[in-house]
Amino acid sequence: MAYVNPSGEFTRDQRYIPTRITEDGRDGYPVEPGRYRLIVSRACPWANRAIIVRRLLGLEDVLSMGVAGPTHDKRSWSFDLDPDGRDPVLGIERLQEAYFARFPGYEKGITVPAMVDIPTGQVVTNDFAQITIDLSLEWTKYQRAGAPALYPASLREQIDKVNRFVFADVNNGVYRAGFAGTQEAYEQAYARLFDRLDKLSSHLEDHRYLVGDTITEADVRLFTTLARFDAVYHNHFKCNRNKLSEMPVLWAYARDLFQTPGFGDTIDFVDIKRHYYLVHRDINPTGIVPAGPDLTTWLEPHDRARLGGRPFGDGTPPPPPREPVPAGHGAV
């Protein structure tokens, strides 16, 4: 599979399935405990958001999670981590089977995260941005006691604004640099990425979190990119002005979140590196996966508590993870 756009700028296909799972079921899919399965890969930053939000909100008992392996081919993500190569709930070998069950011959991207209707085996949605918002707003009846308000009404406009430029310049910006097919397109993406990181760093010098004084959806979205920066984006995507660990404010901010329950305990560095370095063969034709970086630095003190803030607001931290990353795959 080719990922680099030989004509220049990388453009992400954002044609996602817009169906939503809502409390009132207006799209035909009402929120129901045990009805849906969240399909993820721990390698994917977009899916990692859903893993974090599901865990922070305590939805594990009502929304099961299937974990695909870190690599895929033209036929999509596969369940090679499961003993018989099949998702134990859906009984499928590849995620594309759930897409084809609803849309035969589906021609758009077969992506994670995806919400699948268990009774029919059909995909409901892969709209990653909406999935996490809906977990916060539509699944409130089933959230744990003490679940944080990740998308509070009073901050929603600010969160949306931050999310727009973080997506354009950072979340997608690293891909725009990595998959650029010309020097000009690469340099434009590179400049835009680091200009935004510098602005975020300036803001975070005296703000513990991106919006307000608690963790919000905005922090979740930035964190999953920062968690992959030194392991992948700095080298593999040529985002090499600085490592994250060389940007003091952003590095301390990222460590603060990493050490917060629900964040770092979802990060699988082994799967992350396997995905990018093995799948993107047009960038890394040898398929060699780097041995580094040193992960113990993620656990170093960050001194961000001096800025105040209440990580979970009026809520509480989530309990220890029931679905931890495999031993030796993380830094926690």
Image: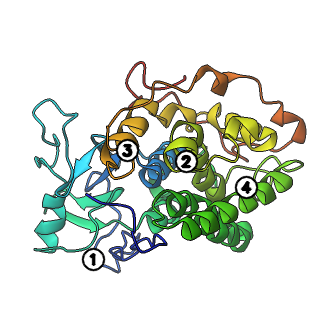
Which one is closest to the eye, mark 1 or mark 4? 4
Residue 57: percent from left, percent from top: 52, 47
Q: Residues within 10 Å of mark 3 (few under 14, many from 20)?
A: some
Q: Is residue 165 left or right of residue 331?
A: right
Which one is closest to the eye, mark 2 or mark 4? 4
Residue to which mark 1 is pinned: 28
Residue to which mark 2 is pinned: 224
Which one is closest to the eye, mark 3 or mark 4? 3
Residue 29: percent from left, percent from top: 29, 71
* Separation of residues labelled 2 and 4 (CA atoms): 14 Å
Tag 2–tag 4 contact (CB < 8 Å): no
Instruction: Identify which residue is drawn at 55% across, 70% down.
Output: 185
Residue to which mark 4 is pinned: 197
Of 256 and 12, nearer the camera is 12
Q: Which residue is situated farthest in the front direction here?
A: 183
Q: Tag on residue 284?
A: 3
The three-letter amino acid code for the residue at tag 4 is: Leu
